[in-house]
Amino acid sequence: MPDSLTFERKIQAITVADLAFPPREGGYAKGHETREEILRAALHLLVNSGYRAMSMRKIAAACGMKLGNLTYHFPTREDLVQALLDSVISSYEIEFDKIMHHPQLPPEGRLDLYCETVLEDLRTLKTTRFFPELWALSNHDPFVFERMHELYVRARAPLDEIVADMRADLPAEKRAALVLFISAAMEGLTVFAGYGKPFEPMMPALEGVATKAFKDLVRTIREEDIP
Amino acid sequence: MPDSLTFERKIQAITVADLAFPPREGGYAKGHETREEILRAALHLLVNSGYRAMSMRKIAAACGMKLGNLTYHFPTREDLVQALLDSVISSYEIEFDKIMHHPQLPPEGRLDLYCETVLEDLRTLKTTRFFPELWALSNHDPFVFERMHELYVRARAPLDEIVADMRADLPAEKRAALVLFISAAMEGLTVFAGYGKPFEPMMPALEGVATKAFKDLVRTIREEDIP
DNA sequence: GGTAAAGTTTATCAAGTGTCCTAAATTTGT
DNA sequence: ACAAATTTAGGACACTTGATAAACTTTACC
């Protein structure tokens, strides 16, 4: 592992096509398209250049329109960020719905699928890219905090449900702690995965360890008693 | 768990007395004290109000001096941030030195102590507070990235050493992955711990699960073969 | 075709940013 | 006492930021 390294991220450009941009009610078609374009550009800037660089002007420039038009669609900057968080949360919802409404899959299978989904996200670095920014923001912006909390709650909900199916006898508190630890481990993994180049060589081995560790946790859920 | 909550962090004000501010070579005593005061105020602002609020003027105002004096000690903003990162890294170094140079402690004991130290940090939320900001920054500021990488390397070094003592037979790559996963799990834990109020009620239970999980990993290191 | 709403541009505002500069006053180490 | 280091008090620079308001253009619909 080198002690000093050049600043090169392996992620060149994020594709945000798979993010959900629900249309607002009773708007012109053109207006909705523009809103989508704005949010896309905003997220692109957020991920690739950071929150500081995600200014109204740069967003406007990124999608080739004037600043005034941007404030027409989003009167304040907070409105824009809110819409952005909405789309992120919606995308999560869609992702986890796929797992929970998977036809004829036992709890164990759903747990495996859940873990596999997160590990896959770790490989493709999809959510990893905007999470650190949003999380840092949430420490000082109350409304970001509330939305991020909502996101965390929704992300853990399916896992909570699965664990409840498998170990209904466990007290809710311990189930919640177990779920939280799995989530935490995954969160930590995305930290290092997102950290990119320095850790890239050992990511395959890390994934092996992670898979084993998660399997251990599954075994804990199945067989052992929680301390 | 409430679905919406008021924005109240349990951490009111950070105390940075235990952070290391190494003196620069060939400076007067007074100058060193002032530098310390500046860095303290800067870190306070970073933690409690975020990186955006950590402007030269606000730092100067926070420690009751004029802007000119601040630029006298730190010609550019980057100089200041560099010094800040230096202090953070130094503090880490001191913390881990205590573990590694503990008299007559076998590798197993040092591993326990290492985990316990991190869990203690999780309880007191010491480093948790500025990590998200710095990490988010590192994604877009090359020099912050290099320093944060240095920090990660130094933080994992002792753990690496311990694991090497315990399992010299394992290939370096797999040892590194194991170390990385333990670090990742801890990193994730600090994420949720730093998240504060919403998770506060279940922190004790979470800590129990975490302790057990870490013990499992230790057992993995001791007895089993890594996949 | 006309009309009202939606969408877009243009121009401007006050405020904040980091950096640089000069000149003087004060404190400190020796 | 003397020189170096530190601090104060300003001002100015070029630049970016979010927000506002007035004009202009396109679109939808009767």
Image: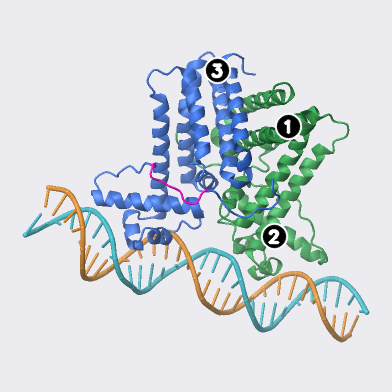
Chain colours: A green, B blue, C orange, D cyan
Residue at 43 percent across and 60 percent down: it is B58
Question: What is the spatial separation of the Cα atoms under label 2 and label 3, in whole angstroms?
Answer: 49 Å
Q: Amino acid at mark 1?
A: Glu
Q: Answer few, some or many: residues within 10 Å of disc 1's Cα (few below 14, many 20 plus, some between 14 and 19).
A: some
Residue at label 2? A38
Residue at label 3? B171
Q: Chain of mark 3?
A: B
Query: Which residues are drawn in magenta?
Result: B11-19
Q: Nearer the viewer, residue B211 or A208?
A: B211
Residue at 78 percent across and 62 percent down: it is A32
Q: Nearer the viewer, residue A129 or A143?
A: A143
- Residue A23 % position (x, y): 80, 59
Q: Main secondary structure of the magenta part?
A: loop
Q: Let me know if residue B174 appears in the view.
A: yes
Residue at label 1? A116
Q: Let me know if residue A129 appears in the view.
A: no
